[in-house]
Image (cartoon, coloured by chain):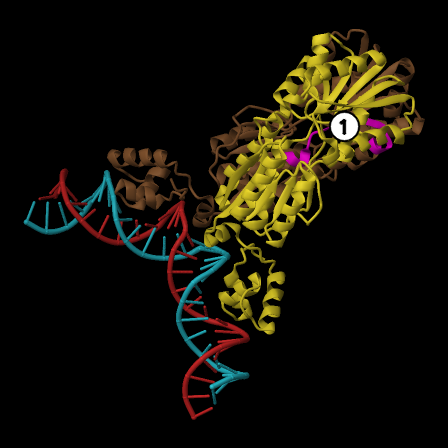
Chain colours: A yellow, B brown, C cyan, D red
DNA sequence: TAAGCCAGAGTGTGCGCAAACACTTATTAA
DNA sequence: TTAATAAGTGTTTGCGCACACTCTGGCTTA
């Protein structure tokens, strides 16, 4: 009846064997007679034995080296948040004997990715967290890591090849759906709605394609055929072309109601709208970058969908730690919620853990 | 340069004393010469010593008894979520030597609260989590616990009397503001908007009053004087009166655009609207009760603000554990985000951890 | 002058676990 | 027959910490 903690020793005594034998059964190592194994497993179940994590961590006294392969925040500030998440997780979880080494690559340079990924492979870490923004180029590495049984966790971009330990991020398709709702809601019964990709190589970016599908399907599924959905790919590498493109879109669609930016670059369009003094357009984008936060507070960006990229970094390291150090089962997909952020609630999303 | 872990023993060696002396300094117990103390504290700082939590938990081998004083979910299902949060936290954190005893009271019966709170006091727990829905009646208990140095954490209702260890919950005022935005957004330029309290004793419910203020202030601050804001207190104890009240509100305000329910009872009005086959009203409420989820999916409730009440229970126990067992500093206010939930993203909020 | 006291410091033990190590018996090969 | 090996099991150590315990030497007091 008493709530005493069950130790390996207790199981051993009850089974009439030594703690060493119980240890062998629990860890599937060494040789144990079938008789002893069955008996011990029975008692483990009966007594609901659960290892004491503190004792385990203390006893193994092992350091797990994790590698975080993430883009450079100084090139695209979006990636600052995952980095902070990784660092917070490291500081929270270092008591479990983990250490994280960061491998930072240039998100606009494939060779940089290849280079850093190779370095990760060479370092032979115990676990890997990676933002696989280059789909084709990432696959051979997945294969390598799989073959060497190094668990890897994906975040930001969902791929299921070569069986990653886990994916952390959002459901891109549903995220597009939600964007559709926010773009449509409260905008009258008809009009033009623009979906725009900014600075992206769409063909190699699976998640952007899925967002677009979700967005279009929202209007289809809700029978909103009176809306005119247009799309654009804009690139700031040619800044005057970027402005010209927006100019002509505005000119040719005077009934433009909403603009949906599929990435965290909504602030670029917000800047444009502010400069041209255009109001009344419902601008929707992603993520709490400082520039975006600013435009939400000014009322130029109406809604942001928060992808919680800091959380993605955090949970990635968390999952690896749970798998390696704590030997816990982890979910193979962890969808983070699609947070709707607007002026009135933005404060509570900024830098929350 | 090497990343070695710093132990008490290392500090002792460097200071030329025994580990016992370092222990006395770190825990402020026993007598230590000023000379030794200064030297040790200097080294602690220099080497950035941080105690090994696993070893600490194992070494102290102490059980902290926590009390959770929460309303009965079988009377109001809203309280099921906090209970699940408490239980999840207990199972996650029991490795740190905590055990939670639940004290369940009837949320519609003050005497039941007084009775259970007394039981908590008598049990003399090491820490207390409480939903202080009865403001006046809770104060003497806070005073008692304060005097006995029993840390207590508040959730759901924010009170700052007698210095609780922490408050977990939402900013009610801002929550009302957000509700104002959701009630107003996309509803044209004028009309009537109803705020309704259901089954509540407003005078003793500080957080509902704050929600109402925030709601009204949203319209004031945004200069939306063309909207007609009306309020109602409805009670289902008299069910025909409840329906009659709604009937007459609907009849006298044919331009009714939105209804804001200040609690988790939005489903009651949704049922009414469904039965009467009234569409086109923008219904807003709180919390992911099964009934509310149902009406969101049917499109009758447009938006829910998720108060994450499971999370509130979880974080309450979490904070107590961190304070007591891990001797970590905890934030005195933990505002959970004001999640906007709608049909397209509700799935990702249901029962997430 | 010895007994008593006490501030200040050192020593030892146990928490539950993982893992290295040691031991016993049965089986096989030489 | 003996040695070598395999199979199964038991014993011990150490992880870092908290905390009770022990020890020392200088001081006071009868």
Horizontal relation, residue A131 to residue A283: left or right: left
Horizontal relation, residue A132 to residue B4: left or right: right
**Residue placed most toward the observer, A61 or B126:** A61
Horizontal relation, residue B318 to residue B73: left or right: left
Locate the N terminus of chain B by quadrant. top left
**Can residue B257 be seen at all in this image of the molecule?**
yes
Name the residue rendered at 66%, 41% in the picture.
Answer: A137
Q: Where does the image place residue A249, in percent across and percent down from the top left?
A: 81, 15
Q: Is residue B174 above or below residue A223?
A: above
Name the residue rendered at 46%, 54% in the picture.
Answer: A59
Instruction: Sort mark 1 into few (<14), some (14-19) or many (20+) by Cα contacts within 10 Å.
Output: many
Q: Where does the image place residue B287, in percent across and percent down from the top left?
A: 74, 31
The secondary element bearing badge 1 is classed as: strand
Name the residue rendered at 56%, 71% in the picture.
Answer: A32
Q: Where does the image place residue A334, in percent across and percent down from the top left?
A: 68, 41
| Magenta residues, start to end | B295-312
**Residue placed most toward the observer, A126 or B76:** A126
Locate the C terminus of chain B by quadrant. top right
**Residue placed most toward the observer, A111 or B263:** A111
- Does the magenta segment cover residue A22? no
* Quarter location, residue A103: top right
**Can residue B234 be seen at all in this image of the molecule?**
no
């Amino acid at each position: 009846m008493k709530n005493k903690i069950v130790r390996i020793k207790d199981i051993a005594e009850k089974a009439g064997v030594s703690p060493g034998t119980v240890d062998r059964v629990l860890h599937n190592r060494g040789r144990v007679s079938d008789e002893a194994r069955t008996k011990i497993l029975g008692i483990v179940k009966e007594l609901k034995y659960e290892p004491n994590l503190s004792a385990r961590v203390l006893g193994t006294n092992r350091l797990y080296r994790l590698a975080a392969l993430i883009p450079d925040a100084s090139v695209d500030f979006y990636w600052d948040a995952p980095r902070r998440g990784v660092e917070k997780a490291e500081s929270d979880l270092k008591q479990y004997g983990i250490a994280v080494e960061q491998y930072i690559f240039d998100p606009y340079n494939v060779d940089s990715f290849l280079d850093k990924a190779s370095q990760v492979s060479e370092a032979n870490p115990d676990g890997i967290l990676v933002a696989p923004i280059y789909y084709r180029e990432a696959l051979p590495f997945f294969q390598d890591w799989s073959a060497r049984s190094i668990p890897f966790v994906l975040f930001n971009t969902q791929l299921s090849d070569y069986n990653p330990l886990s994916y952390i991020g959002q459901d891109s398709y549903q995220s597009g759906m939600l964007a559709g709702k926010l773009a449509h809601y409260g905008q009258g019964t008809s009009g033009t709605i623009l979906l725009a990709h900014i600075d992206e190589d769409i063909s190699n970016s699976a998640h952007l394609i899925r967002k677009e599908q979700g967005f279009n399907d929202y209007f289809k599924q809700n029978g909103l055929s009176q809306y005119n959905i247009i799309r654009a790919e804009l690139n700031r590498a040619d800044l005057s072309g970027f402005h010209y493109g927006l100019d002509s879109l505005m000119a040719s669609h005077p009934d433009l109601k909403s603009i949906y930016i599929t990435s965290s670059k909504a602030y670029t369009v917000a800047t444009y709208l502010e400069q041209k003094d255009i109001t009344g357009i419902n601008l929707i984008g992603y993520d709490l970058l400082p520039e975006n936060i600013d435009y939400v507070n000014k009322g130029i960006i109406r809604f942001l969908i928060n992808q919680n990229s800091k959380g993605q970094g955090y949970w990635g390291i968390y999952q690896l730690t749970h798998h390696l150090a704590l030997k816990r089962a982890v979910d193979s997909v962890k969808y983070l919620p699609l947070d709707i952020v607007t002026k009135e609630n933005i404060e509570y999303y900024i830098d929350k853990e």
